[in-house]
Image (cartoon, rainbow, N blue to C red):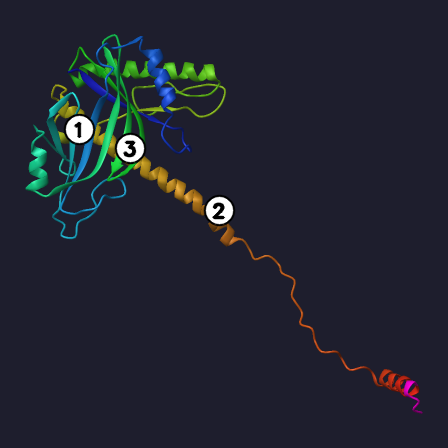
Amino acid sequence: MGVKLLVRALQPKGVVGPAPYDILKRLVDELCASQLPGRSEAWSVTCQLLKQGHGLVGTVGGPAAGVGGGLKDMWVVSFRDSPDQAFLLMRPEFKVLECEAAVMRLLEKKLEFAKQMTVRFEGHTYSKGDFLLRLCTATQAIHSTQALLGHCLEVEYLPLSSLTTSEAMMAEFVDLMRQLLTEMGAGMGMGMAGDGGGGGGRQGGGGGGTALQLEVLKPSFDKYGIANMPYSRTHAAVAYSDLVVAMLNTSAAAAAAAAAAQQQPQQQYQQQPPQYQQPQYQQHPQQQQPPQQQQYQQQQQQQQLGVK
């Protein structure tokens, strides 16, 4: 196994929602000359959040505080190409354990862990020289509800397994992707490539619009104590768990921004000063006529009646 790098595709600032899939697909098609034979089948990584007891999922997919304070949450990461393995991650304690997939039954039956949420990454594998590139779509499932979290790219450099040695090659490949996005954006008359915070990328140019962001994920290998070890599936499990949390945070922030934008017109309407309304006057009883007019009317009536 080579060294892997996860790259998030983010919308420009102020734009809500996942980055367009068709742009990333075109990037992969232009970057990779041919799809690797025999690897066109579905490729996937599954991340499950398990909660001990009957806890609830928090706002960003993390555990809600239990009443007794003793409940624990756990992430389980599994890879499709290694179905017999599972990686258990205790994120608050930064502990990761590789085990057999059969341990899941023990967790559910004996320790009363229940599945609260599943995030699944699915995609296909492409090749460019010594690099493998996987375009992934992340989908969140809570019970029977599914939602699209976004898209990401997994870059694997096959010749090396050292994180330090492969860092320069990875940064160069990410720069290549950003440069290609810039050229694609220039051809379409819009900015499409930007520096998302890693690898020394170039800022995209173009006729107008803000650039699409490629953000390199920086996993917390140091906190798990695996930074100096050769890259393995344990590193990949930690990286994908960090990616899931980052995507859930982005999704929660986007939902909060959308809710705030929806409430803003209502607040503006409530804060508007009341419009002037013309007062409605009550109809008063007819005023008494002056004595002279009353006398004149009486005389007229008497004349009509023949009274002098």
- Quadrant occupied by the N terminus: top left
82 shown above or below 76: above
Single out the residue that lies furthest toward the bottom.
308
Task: Choose the circle earlier in sequence order: 2 or 3.
Answer: 3
Please tell me how crowded label 2 is: few (under 14), some (14-19), or many (20+) other residues with Cα within 10 Å: few
- Quadrant occupied by the C terminus: bottom right
- Residue depicted at 41% across the width and 21% down the height: 192
Q: Residue 238 — which label?
A: 1
Residue beneath disc 3: 247
- Amino acid type at mark 1: Val
Question: In the displayed structure, does residue 163 sit left or right of residue 266?
Answer: left
User: Which type of secondary structure does the marked residue at label 2 adopt?
Assistant: helix
- Residue depicted at 42% across the width and 15% down the height: 184
For the record, the magenta segment spans 304-308
Does residue 109 appear anywhere in the picture? yes
Query: Could you say which is closer to the camera, residue 275 or residue 127?
Result: 127
Does residue 194 appear anywhere in the picture? no
Q: Residue 265 — which label?
A: 2
Q: Is residue 307 magenta?
A: yes
Helix, strand or loop: magenta stretch: loop
